[in-house]
Amino acid sequence: SQQGEEDPQALSIQEGENATMNCSYKTSINNLQWYRQNSGRGLVHLILIRSNEREKHSGRLRVTLDTSKKSSSLLITASRAADTASYFCATIRTGTASKLTFGTGTRLQVTL
Amino acid sequence: GAGVSQSPSNKVTEKGKDVELRCDPISGHTALYWYRQSLGQGLEFLIYFQGNSAPDKSGLPSDRFSAERTGGSVSTLTIQRTQQEDSAVYLCASSPGLAFRDTQYFGPGTRLTVL
């Protein structure tokens, strides 16, 4: 079963705008990761945030984690057409070793 | 070195036939994972190998699904007596094997179509 639910399911913005995607999960976690998927095939790891961290940055990406609300957000600043993809959050639940549990994804469309 | 590779990239089969999907992890990675992604859905965990430990098979949807990992490297996912609902993209990932600290590196996937 899916652990995470992304919100929104689909997002369309213009190049240069910021995109924010949210992820909620149900159980306690060791860490939360965000992945990008182009064209329904291979996933690319974007960023990992541990359960004791609240915010993390990587280039144009900013991830926040609120363990009290069991939620995370991914912000992509100054979006580009190349950012068009599906974005998934994935969690490693406490006590389940390395098994990732994925959310349902947000489909981001960045137009020129 | 090279990333995770999977073969074939596409597989079309008839209902009832058996299929084998192959995954070559990144050299030196001790952990290997199989996931399934149905059309428009998130990824569903299938099975996880870590070194010489017994695999975590908790995600396999039925006994028609099995996987092996030979010599701690290459893995094969076998689906017997395929059904139309098995149609999906099957993704393999590997990681260095440091438990929950690791990023998982994904292959390009095998798109399975069962007619």
Image (cartoon, coloured by chain):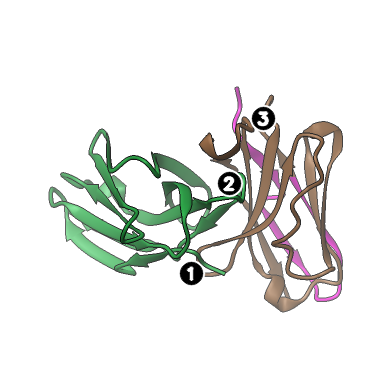
Chain colours: A green, B brown
Q: Which element is circle 2 on?
A: loop
What is the CA distance from the residue labelled 3 to the residue labelled 2?
17 Å
Give amino acid for label 3.
His
What is the CA distance from the residue labelled 2 to the residue labelled 1?
16 Å
Specify the label residue B108 is tagged with. 2
Q: Which element is circle 3 on?
A: loop
Give how far across and how far down residue B47 sits, in percent. 71, 54
Q: Chain of mark 2?
A: B
- Quadrant of image for the N terminus of chain A: bottom right
Q: Is residue A102 above or below residue A51?
A: below
What is the CA distance from the residue labelled 3 to the residue labelled 1?
29 Å
Give amino acid for label 2.
Pro
Say left or right for A19 vs B90: left
Q: Residue furthest left?
A: A16
Q: Residue at x 78, y 37 (%)?
A: B74
Say if mark 3 contacts mark 1, CB within 8 Å. Answer: no
Label 2 Cα neighbours within 10 Å, binned few <14 / some 14-19 / many ≥20: many
**Of pointers 3 and 1, the one earlier in the residue sequence:** 3
Q: Residue furthest front?
A: A68
Q: Residue furthest top?
A: B1
In this rendering, the label closer to the viewer, 3 or 2: 3
Is residue B18 located in the magenta-colored stretch of the structure?
yes
Residue on which the image places disc 3: B29
Give how far across and how far down residue B40 sits, in percent. 48, 69
Q: Chain of mark 1?
A: B
Say if mark 2 contacts mark 1, CB within 8 Å. Answer: no
Give how far across and how far down residue B107 sits, in percent. 60, 43
Say left or right for B54 vs B104: right
Q: Residue at x 47, y 61 (%)?
A: A27
* Range shown magenta: B1-22
Specify the label residue B40 is tagged with. 1
**Of pointers 3 and 2, the one earlier in the residue sequence:** 3
